[in-house]
Image (cartoon, rainbow, N blue to C red):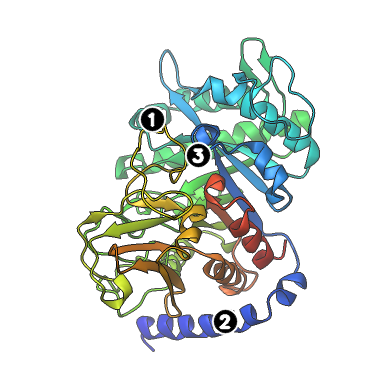
């Protein structure tokens, strides 16, 4: 039996099983045991144009569903020595204007998102909060490369990050011990020259956190962000890197985007022979297989779901816009789905909160179905899309159906299932947190 035939046979069996289990929802979800990770990234800048705060997680019930809250981001500096640094002090701990999580006013000196997280943890003591270090900025990427290149640099960076965020020495006169329970290392993306240093940096963080555990009696969490594209994860020693962490947040999105001239599914669960790019591993199942083959334990595989979609315009009305040429990225829609945003400066309200051509939040895309767009579900790829023939605009995204099916996949892919799931990013859900709550139901939370 050829490997390709076996993969297609396995895919067919998984799809049939998941569709059957989905037909039992919610009874199926209610009878399942808990224990899977459900994480969510909270962007520090959410409080600005999007007006999304930590308090929203409490108000809409999403905080009850999360096991891990991942805060993005802290920066990496190298001068005068490798260290963590605050990216936005106003958002992180200074602004006194954020709504209270618990109803109690914040008190000096801890305000901002950190003050809100402190209240959230008081209400949800089992919630683990991680500081994500890095992100896509060129400065942070250079910082990781430099800091990880020597033993002294790795030791200095880990010690600084632990002192600032776990021990809570945030700034002069601002302390919050235990605010964070560990780290998510978001190094995008190591090159082949960084392979050994990437693992060594994780090992140094793990070693220092373990040493701290002996003093405090607490267990600290380590994770790193794993890319989906083979050209990126090939530079990581996945087996040995995985040994240093509790889980890996592995991207399950950006398999396609408005940087491509042809439309395609951005977060499909499976491949399809109908896809012009068939066989190029541009699907979640292929990514899962690659990580597991590399030696990553299934329990450490945490699947990422996007709470945003990719869009194109100038797409002909053929195959409801899928696999078609385009004239470029979609325009930014209004958040209520009734038209287009004409001011991307952030000075006017009412636009999709990402304010970026070619992408839109789930909260906005859910409104397009009542404003000229039709939804299409691909049962082979387990993907969903929107198309409006009048504007020739196409979006690929995740909705509650695909989100629930992906959670079932996590449960049945291998014996014992995968480790869980996470979203980028929490602010991009609708006001009720529909996507996160659907994922929680699918994971049995």
SS at mark 1? Answer: loop
Q: Tell me where residue 366 appears, x and y as whole percent.
A: 50, 60
Select label 3 or label 2 by which is in front.
Answer: 2
Write down the residue under mark 1. Answer: 149
Q: Front-most of 316 and 140? A: 316
Between discs 1 and 2, the one toward the N terminus = 2
Q: Tell me where residue 72 appears, x and y as whole percent.
A: 52, 36
In the displayed structure, does residue 304 sit left or right of residue 231? right
Q: Front-most of 112 and 271? A: 112
Picture quarter containing residue 122?
A: top right
Write down the residue under mark 2. Answer: 19
Q: Give me the residue at 52% from left, 69% from top.
A: 402
Between discs 1 and 3, the one toward the N terminus = 1
Q: Front-most of 101 and 218? A: 101
Neighbor class of circle 2 (other Cα within 10 Å; few <14, some 14-19, many 20+) is: some
Q: Tell me where residue 324 appears, x and y as whole percent.
A: 24, 69
SS at mark 3? Answer: strand
**Vertical order, 177 against 186 (above or below):** above
Select label 1 or label 3 by which is in front.
Answer: 3
Q: Tell me where residue 382 appears, x and y as whole percent.
A: 46, 74
Between discs 3 and 2, the one toward the N terminus = 2
| Alpha carbons under labels 1 and 2: distance apart | 48 Å
Neighbor class of circle 1 (other Cα within 10 Å; few <14, some 14-19, many 20+) is: some
């Amino acid at each position: 039996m050829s490997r390709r035939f076996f993969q297609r046979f396995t895919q067919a069996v998984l799809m049939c099983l998941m569709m059957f289990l989905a037909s039992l929802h919610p009874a199926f979800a209610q009878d399942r045991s808990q224990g899977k990770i459900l994480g969510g990234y909270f962007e520090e800048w959410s409080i600005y144009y999007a007006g999304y705060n930590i308090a929203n997680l409490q108000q809409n019930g999403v905080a009850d569903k999360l096991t891990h809250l991942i805060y993005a981001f802290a920066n990496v500096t190298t001068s005068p020595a490798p260290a963590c640094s605050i990216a936005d002090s106003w958002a992180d701990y200074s602004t006194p204007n954020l709504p209270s999580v618990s109803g109690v006013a914040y008190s000096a000196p801890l305000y901002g998102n950190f003050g809100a997280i402190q209240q959230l943890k008081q209400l949800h003591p089992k919630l683990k909060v991680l500081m994500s270090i890095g992100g896509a900025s060129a400065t942070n990427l250079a910082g990781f490369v430099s800091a990880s290149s020597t033993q002294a640099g790795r030791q200095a960076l880990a010690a600084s990050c632990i002192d600032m965020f776990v021990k809570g020495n945030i700034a002069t006169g601002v302390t919050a011990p235990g605010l964070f329970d560990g780290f998510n290392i978001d190094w995008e993306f190591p090159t082949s020259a960084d392979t050994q240093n990437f693992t060594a940096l994780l090992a140094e963080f793990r070693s220092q956190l373990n040493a701290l555990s002996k003093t405090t009696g607490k267990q600290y969490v380590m994770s790193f962000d794993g890319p989906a594209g083979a050209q990126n994860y090939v530079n990581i020693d996945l087996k040995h890197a995985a040994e240093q962490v509790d889980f890996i947040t592995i991207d399950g999105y950006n398999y396609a985007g408005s940087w491509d001239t042809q439309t395609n599914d951005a977060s499909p669960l499976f491949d399809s022979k109908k896809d012009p790019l068939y066989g190029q591993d541009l699907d979640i199942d292929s990514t899962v297989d690659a990580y597991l083959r590399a030696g990553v334990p299934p329990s450490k595989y945490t699947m990422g779901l996007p709470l945003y979609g990719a869009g194109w315009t100038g797409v002909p009305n053929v195959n409801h816009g899928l696999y078609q040429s385009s004239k470029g990225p979609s325009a930014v829609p209004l958040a209520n789905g009734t038209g287009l945003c004409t001011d991307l400066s952030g000075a006017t309200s009412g636009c999709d909160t990402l304010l970026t051509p070619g992408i839109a939040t789930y909260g906005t895309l859910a409104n397009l179905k009542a404003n000229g767009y039709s939804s299409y579900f691909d049962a082979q790829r387990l993907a969903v899309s929107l198309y409006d023939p009048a504007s020739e605009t196409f979006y690929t995204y995740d909705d509650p159906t695909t989100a629930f099916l992906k959670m079932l996949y996590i449960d049945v892919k291998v014996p014992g299932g995968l480790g869980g799931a996470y979203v980028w990013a929490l602010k991009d859900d609708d006001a009720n947190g529909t996507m996160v709550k659907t994922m929680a139901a699918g994971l049995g939370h």
